[in-house]
Image (cartoon, rainbow, N blue to C red):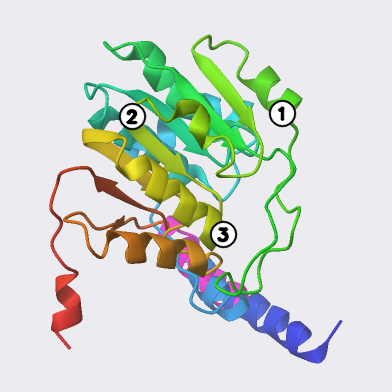
């Protein structure tokens, strides 16, 4: 084991011992976790585990059934579920660009099934992983990452009827739905070019009041996706609203103010 890694582990162990020596409360445990997190992954921030949704049995059942209960995406999944409520009464279908295992599409399909409006969910993915990253995309991804086959997604979503699949590289299959309009668009393709292609195509087909959510917006792992969104929306009345667990969304037709704290320095 490299010396610097061993030193970090020893420091983390010392922090835990010190905090547990005299007190064993939830506050001290969280303090220990936060200090250990900053030691091992500088800049990593924990959140308080007191939100009601953390104890929601239905939501936790969904997370457990999809293997996400102890994963890193629980906050993103809850935010997706809540944003879907905003578009419940907006006419138009739903779409996801970048489906992976279908976990977020499951939530969208469930929302569609309970909506007072008839909505079909359209899914675009290569089902071969991501394409070759470009110069805008940093060093995190390689071609073929996040590969999951079409058959596996179809099996996961077999309980839903109003679904349509479009295997292929974005944007090759977009022409198949060029005459449709949408109430909710979820873009989760990680890279600059497919994010750019997706937002350019779906923005004009998103009905007023509809939501466009980019899962990768604001993520250090996906700088190209953030840049694609900001560049496209720079001439539009809307702009992306950043979410606490990364990701960002906009509401079609809703003019968005600037990040005011940038003027406070």
Q: Provide the major secondary structure of the magenta segment.
A: helix
Q: Nearer the viewer, mark 2 or mark 1?
A: 2
Q: Secondary structure at mark 2?
A: strand
94 relative position to 192: left or right: left
Where residue 226 appears, as percent x and y from the top left, is 42, 64
Q: Which residue is mark 1?
A: 150
Q: Secondary structure at mark 3?
A: loop
Task: Look at the numbered discs 1 and 3 and tell me whether their residues touch, using CB distance below 8 Å.
Answer: no
Image mark for residue 191: 3
Q: Earlier in the sequence, mark 2 or mark 3?
A: 2
Does 5 appear above or below 66? Answer: below
Between the residue at mark 2 and the residue at mark 3, the CA separation in whole angstroms equals: 23 Å
Does 8 appear above or below 215? Answer: below
Question: Which class describes the residues within 10 Å of circle 2: few (<14), some (14-19), or many (20+)?
Answer: many
Q: Nearer the viewer, residue 237 or 159?
A: 237
User: Is 185 a magenta residue?
Assistant: no
């Amino acid at each position: 084991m490299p010396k610097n890694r061993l030193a970090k582990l020893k420091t983390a162990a010392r922090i835990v011992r010190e905090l547990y020596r005299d007190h064993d409360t939830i506050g001290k445990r969280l303090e220990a976790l936060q200090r250990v997190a900053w030691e091992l992954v500088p800049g990593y921030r924990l959140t308080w585990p007191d939100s009601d949704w953390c104890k929601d049995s239905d939501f936790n059942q969904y997370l457990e059934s999809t293997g996400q209960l102890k994963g890193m995406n629980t906050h993103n999944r809850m935010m997706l579920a809540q944003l879907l409520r905003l578009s419940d009464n907006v006419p138009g279908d739903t779409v996801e660009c970048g489906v992976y295992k279908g976990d977020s599409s499951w939530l969208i399909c469930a929302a569609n099934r309970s909506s007072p409006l008839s909505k079909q969910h359209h899914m675009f993915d290569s089902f071969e992983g991501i394409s070759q990253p470009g110069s805008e995309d940093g060093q995190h991804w390689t071609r073929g990452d996040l590969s999951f086959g079409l058959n596996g997604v179809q099996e996961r979503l077999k309980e839903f009827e109003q679904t349509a699949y479009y295997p292929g590289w974005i944007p090759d299959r977009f022409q198949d739905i060029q005459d449709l309009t949408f109430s909710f668009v979820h873009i989760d393709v990680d890279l600059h070019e497919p994010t750019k292609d997706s937002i350019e195509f779906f923005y004009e087909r998103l009905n007023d009041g509809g939501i466009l959510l980019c899962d990768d917006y604001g993520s250090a792992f996906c700088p190209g996706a953030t840049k694609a969104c900001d560049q496209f929306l720079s001439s539009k009345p809307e702009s992306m609203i950043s979410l606490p667990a990364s990701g960002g969304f906009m509401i079609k037709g809703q003019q968005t103010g600037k990040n005011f704290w940038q003027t406070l320095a």
